[in-house]
Amino acid sequence: MLSVLALLAPAAGIAYLGAVSYRDEKGAVNAQQERQRQAALAIAGRIDRAIGETLDAVDRTIDSGGDRVDTPLGRYWFWIDGDGQLKRPRIVQAMEPPVSLSRGCAFGLEDCVRELTTRQGRLAKLHAAQAAEGAGAWTDARRQYTQLASADDTGPAALLGLARVLGKLGDAKGADAQLAELDRRFPDRNFEGVPVKLATAVLRAQSPDALLALAEQIVGGAFDVDAIVKVGVLTRLRERLAADLPPALAARRAALDERMAELRNLARMAAGLADDVPELVHTATASWRGHAAAHQAGRILIYRRRPDNTVTGIAVDAHMLEAAAGHENSDDVALHVRPLVLPTGAKGPPDQRELERIPLGEALSDLSLALVNPQSDPDPLDDIIRGRSRRHVVFTSALALALGLGLLAMIRGAARARELAQLKSDFVSTVSHELKTPLTSIRMFAEMLEQGVAQGDQAKMHRYHGVIVQESQRLGLLIANLLDYAQIEKGTRRYTPTREQAGELARHAVTTFEALRGEGPRNPIEVEVSSDASVMVDRDVVVQALLNLVSNAAKYGGEHPIEVRVAADDLMASISVTDHGPGIPAHEQARIFREFYRAPEAYRSGVEGTGLGLALVKRHIEALGGTVEVASTIGQGATFTIRLPREAA
Ligand code: ADP
């Protein structure tokens, strides 16, 4: 029963633990996955909010007539008017409007043709003048430009050329005068998108300081021109700046370079946006939506229609969206975790582990948000599982150990049971033999007496009677032992304690034993009472125990004398039986008290016995509250000591 429990309990424990830890582990993994999902949702929410706020800021900027949207996503904002034209950023304007012919044609077709021919002639002259200027023929160029300066169509270009040529000829004053005239006569004209005002300012600026000041004005929006024009003019101004500038100017130049890079982006975007405009106008609704730009997959256009039917929007890239989400503590579901905005369906970078991926919502259906951490970092799920499984392993090993011990106990139990079965079967044959031997002697001597074998020989007859008595007594002790054992086994053995003197009990046992002993060699038995004590015991039981010990001493101790000693201390009385026989090896000393156990030596020596005597001694004496123990040195004999509690104690 116990060993079955010892096996079942740990086995059930392992099964239970397995189930619990599986559930536990699954729960922990689910919890981590849910945390990752919540973090991703929160980041997506923040991106959504940033977009909404930026679009509102764009609206406010438009309403206030401003130029800048001060949010991280508002850097490249755009605005398309009701006619589907980009209002901002503006695309480079049409070339200089063709000179109107209507005035020249007022008097009929002939005038028209004449006007057209002279205009073509003037244009040819303008080209010749520009060629002369290009070749460095300053005076020729000056003459030709002067002739063209008065005309309405070639005037602006001629005046500008004249100013340049005069500058080359060292006539700064003259050049200035030409520029002033240009400003006065043609304030509304432009050269390929560069307004006259700006063109003259560029020519006037000479010193690095003046060049930088003009560039800063352009950047600051002093001239109402497109980004592309701005970039073109700025590039030209920038080229005219000397390489080595004093530190203060160099710093201004660096700042200028930065703004130019920005403008270049804006210009590029304006150019890129042109292709998307029809699509944006077509699909814009009051609530915002977004998609990748037609020719640049990396650029995402997010836009919506305003109540005035114009369309506003922003151009962003994945990185800007990630940055706009910012960082919050709830994002940290693992070490070094960060958000990545990716086209839906696209794989993330190979060195990053995707912890979670969610779509960025209906408005940005082309994009998804991935929460990633580096592959080189531990997987947070692994971490959780590892932590749990470590605990699991500890528990399971402990239980497995218990299971192993249980198994061992069971094996030992089985071995013990087998041993016991063997002992019992040995016992049956031994007992039969033990019963038979005295019975045979008794019958033999009784028959001899009956047949008158000892007729007339008193001594012989006395000896025959003696054998019969002695053998019956031996039989009696044996049967008493057997009955005792049966009673003890059944648990029905009762003890009747009476007050006894330990010394008297010892003497009585020895006298009884002497009476039982037959003829033949007998070893002397000496009783020595050093201090006597009274004990409350079942007299018969103690005497029978002592008889067993003395009988063993006589059986196994050879012809050497036997000593029986009685002593007492404050608590206990002790009776010991010492023989000087072969002794009992240490490893046998515990076994000899087991039922039916007989040492191999006992079998070898041919001494008869049942293996029951010492077992009964031990059970009886312990039942009386005492102890029995053995001390022995091989070759020198053995001492069995019974200790009984003193009556006073
Ligand atoms: P048995 O009927 O065999 O004597 P016991 O229970 O009295 O059974 O003793 C058990 C075994 O202990 C004996 O078989 C013997 O091997 C050993 N034994 C007992 N007493 C002694 C002794 N005085 N000297 C040596 N061996 C002894």
Image: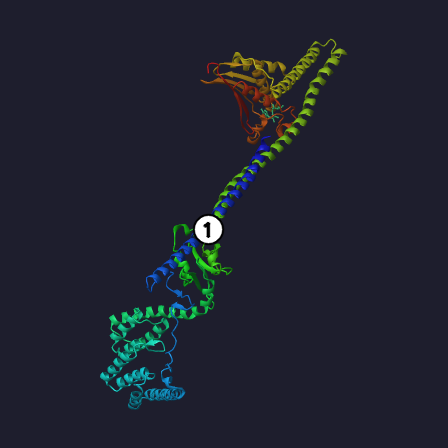
| Element marked by disc 1 | helix
Picture coordinates of residue 374, whole percent (x, y): 45, 57
Q: Nearer the viewer, residue 440 or 427?
A: 427
Single out the residue that lies furthest toward the right.
451
> Is residue 540 shown above or below 236?
above
* 603 to 506, vertically: above or below: below
Estimate the x, y position of residue 211 in percent, counting from the top left: 27, 75
The residue that appears at 66% across and 25% down in the rendered structure is 427
The answer to whether residue 154 shows anywhere in this view is yes
Q: Nearer the viewer, residue 101 or 141?
A: 101
- Residue drawn at (59%, 36%) of the image: 407
Q: Would you identify the image quadrant in which residue 128 lies? A: bottom left
Residue type at mark 1 is: Gln
Q: Position of residue 101 (x, y in %)?
A: 38, 83
Mark 1: give few (<14), some (14-19) or many (20+) Cα within 10 Å: many
Residue 104 or residue 88, whichever sits in front:
104
User: Does the residue tagged 1 have its C-beta within 8 Å of any atom of ligand 1?
Assistant: no
Judging by the rendered image, the residue that carries numbered circle 1 is 36
Q: Quadrant of residue 441?
A: top right
Say left or right for 274 vs 588.
left
Q: How many marks?
A: 1
How far across and down, in percent of the image, does residue 9 sit? 56, 35
Quadrant into which the N terminus falls? top right
Please indicate whether residue 605 sits to the left or right of residue 322 in the image.
right
Q: Up-down: is 446 above or below 371?
A: above
Q: Is residue 497 left or right of residue 228?
A: right
- Image quarter for ligand 1 equals top right
**Is residue 69 visible in this depiction of the protein?**
no
